[in-house]
Structures are given as structure tokens and as C-alpha cells.
């Protein structure tokens, strides 16, 4: 099968999201970098670089209707979680028992969608709540290998369209399900499902709520971490 995107690998960039946007012309683009100087995460947070990290952004023009794009961030997280064999915190934080090892950022403008993925491959002395995927440095070739594998799986999972995204596979990876959670401004409840549009279904003291965006915090997770 021919590579469905053009590949660009850099030692260092400001942000793979910005580079992918600038390079995306007629066809999909994958940008992979060993280091970012001005990377960003969800809600505008700065990206912290582990000693061995990978930042990858896949830019493409989607056929998914704008109103049905809610699952795209979840599918992007699922692709990374399956490649790395880690868990997910809704919607797309990558987590292990030791802490968060990566995350996803999706930006869109019209039909153009840019999906960014940042992973701490190895981090011997991480800050609290963070961790690396590997116990030892996997070496620089792992950066491009992961970027390619993630993009290839992402393309495969997105191909069937918004009504056939792998919801059950996502559920199996999602550590938020079954957890007591809180969210801003004063939300609290137990996460029980992910709906067909990617929303998190939560049972609260006053009824059922569905979250479509924002950050949730685990109070009691299913499993030892999340």
C-alpha cells in the first residue's frame, strides 16, 4: 500500500501543528519532530519536552461533516494508545500506572484538520503526574517509527467515517469509564459510557450529563492510575 501522506522529519521545530499547516497542500502531510520549542497542548498549555520525546502532526482534509467530527480526537488518541499499549483518559490523554505519558490536540479550519500527538518516550526524572513510556531510552529511530505507525493507524481508523468509528475499542482503553470524576465549574459524577458522538456520559446526583469538551479529573479511577 502506498504511503497516503508526505512525510517530513525534523530534529527541532517550533510546533509540528504549525509546520504541518504550512506544508499541507493538495494531499495529507505528516510532520514528525524530536523536539518542539513552542509546542502546545489542549486548552493552550505549553508542551514540556522529555529527554526522548516525539511530536507528530497529521494534517488532512476530511470528508466528515463538521457536525459529526466529535469522535476525531478520540480516534486519534485511540490510535496512539494502541501503538504504545497504554490507557486513555477521556478524551485523549495517554496514561499508564505511573502517570500521563502523552496527549493529543486537534485543530480544524473548514475541511482542514490537524491532529497533533505528543509522547514522552523516555523520562527518567519526570515532574509529578508525568512519566515516560519506556524504562530505558529507545533511541532516536523510535521517534520516526512511532510517528509513522500512529499516522498509518489513524488513517485506517478514520476511513470508515463518523458513524463507524471504533467506539468499543476506545471504551476498552478508556480508564475514565467507571471513575468518579469532577469538571469545571462544579460538576461531579461517575463516568459510565462514551456516546456515538464521542461525548462522555456521566451519572450525577441530579441525572445524566454528557460532556463534549473540557477537562475532567479522576477522583476514583478504574485501575491503579488515570
Image (cartoon, rainbow, N blue to C red):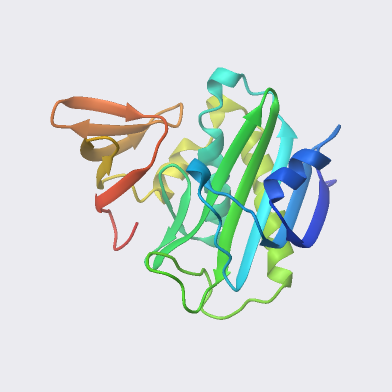
Q: Is residue 169 above or below residue 135?
A: above
Residue 11 vs residue 122, the one in the foreground: 11
Q: Could you tell me if residue 33 is visible in this image?
A: yes
Residue at 57% x, 69% y: name it.
50
Q: Is residue 185 above or below residue 101?
A: above
Q: Is residue 90 above or below residue 26?
A: below
Residue at 73% x, 35% y: name it.
60
Percent position (x, y) of residue 131? Answer: 46, 68
Q: Is residue 70 left or right of residue 113?
A: left
Residue 33 vs residue 68, the one in the foreground: 33
Q: Is residue 11 left or right of residue 114?
A: right
Q: Quadrant of residue 129?
A: bottom left
**Residue at the extreme left:** 205
Percent position (x, y) of residue 42? Answer: 51, 44
Residue at 50% x, 49% y: name it.
45
Q: Is residue 38 left or right of residue 85?
A: right
Residue 200 vs residue 152, the one in the foreground: 200
Percent position (x, y) of residue 2? Answer: 85, 46
Residue at 76% x, 46% y: name it.
19
Q: Could you tell me if residue 152 is visible in this image?
A: no
Amino acid at each position: 500500500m502506498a504511503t497516503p501522506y508526505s512525510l517530513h522529519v525534523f530534529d527541532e521545530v517550533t510546533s509540528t501543528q504549525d509546520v504541518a499547516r504550512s506544508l499541507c497542500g493538495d494531499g495529507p502531510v505528516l510532520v514528525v519532530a524530536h523536539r518542539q520549542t513552542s509546542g502546545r497542548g489542549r486548552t493552550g498549555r505549553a508542551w514540556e519536552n522529555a529527554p526522548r520525546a516525539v511530536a507528530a502532526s497529521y494534517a488532512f482534509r476530511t470528508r466528515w461533516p463538521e457536525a459529526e467530527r466529535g469522535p476525531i480526537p478520540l480516534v486519534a488518541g485511540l490510535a496512539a494508545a494502541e501503538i504504545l499499549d497504554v490507557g486513555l483518559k477521556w478524551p485523549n490523554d495517554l496514561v499508564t500506572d505511573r502517570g500521563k505519558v502523552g496527549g493529543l490536540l486537534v485543530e480544524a479550519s473548514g475541511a482542514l484538520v490537524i491532529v497533533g500527538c505528543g509522547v514522552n518516550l523516555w523520562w527518567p526524572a519526570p515532574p509529578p503526574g508525568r512519566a515516560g513510556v519506556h524504562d530505558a531510552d529507545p533511541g532516536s529511530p523510535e521517534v520516526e517509527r512511532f510517528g509513522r505507525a500512529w499516522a498509518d493507524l489513524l488513517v485506517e481508523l478514520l476511513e470508515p467515517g463518523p458513524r463507524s468509528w471504533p467506539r468499543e475499542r476506545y471504551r476498552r482503553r478508556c480508564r475514565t469509564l467507571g471513575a468518579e470524576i469532577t469538571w469545571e465549574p462544579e460538576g461531579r459524577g461517575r463516568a459510565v459510557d462514551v456516546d456515538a458522538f464521542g461525548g462522555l456520559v456521566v451519572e450525577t446526583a441530579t441525572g445524566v450529563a454528557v460532556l463534549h469538551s473540557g477537562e475532567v479529573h479522576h477522583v476514583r479511577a478504574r485501575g491503579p492510575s488515570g
